[in-house]
Amino acid sequence: MNSDQLAKMRSVRMHDVFPRLGLTGESAALIQGEGDAATALGRLEQAGFLGEAVKLLAHALPNREAVWWACMCSHHTTPADLPEADRAAAQAAEQWVRKQTDEVRREAFDHAQRAGFGTAESWAAVAAFWSGDSMSPLGQPKVPPAPHLAATAVTGAIALASVRLHPARREDRLRRFLASGREIAGGGVGRMEREEDR
């Protein structure tokens, strides 16, 4: 999929995104100075820097699409015995994608707190919360989240989903996740079937 097909990334300026990625060494050198996010993404993938590519895509997508991507990735590796608190966090994150109100956003964070911030689902919910205009409790002066925080939570959610239950599947999962993210960047749904527990 070329950059023309990744419509959701078209307005991304790499000079804004690159400092947020925290890349070093070969992966940083590979995309240093690249102006086009889609080209940079392709370079990282082709060189096998899959975790770095996930990070770039999380920062390049609009928050709504990035949170949806985290939800799709977490769903792919959701175990059958996922605790109810984590299921509620996942549902709240998906609800925020569909209805981006402050109430839904804060409910997502409440569920993430109850879940204990230990799963992909809870970090998808945190990403939804950090996509709003304030991290302060209701009635308090607004404290806007830093621009990179939602993408950082998305990256964390996807990292957790990639190693859940079967860490040896990480690379294959990240490739599937990146294909899903590219589909979302192109305006698609990016849905993946839940992986079999085996």
Image: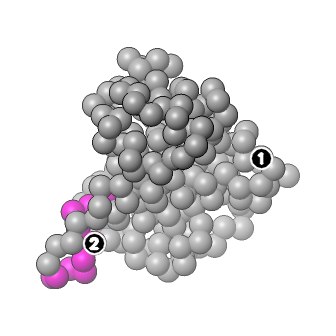
The residue singled out by tag 1 in the image is 169
Q: Position of residue 129 (x, y in %)?
A: 35, 65
Quadrant of the rendered image containing residue 141: bottom left
Q: Which colour scheme is used?
A: one colour
Q: Give the range drawn in magenta.
A: 131-140
Residue 135: in magenta span: yes
Image vertical order of residue 57 relative to residue 82, above or below: above
At horizontal 45% and vertical 74% (from top left) the residue drawn is 111
Give the x, y percent position of residue 165: 77, 60
Q: Residue at x 71, y 67 (%)?
A: 81
**Does the magenta run of residues contain 68?**
no
Dot 2 falls on a residue whose secondary structure is loop
| Front position in the image: 88 or 142 | 142
| Residue 72 visible | no
Q: Residue flagged by tag 1: what amino acid is it?
A: Arg
The three-letter code of the residue at mark 2 reads Met
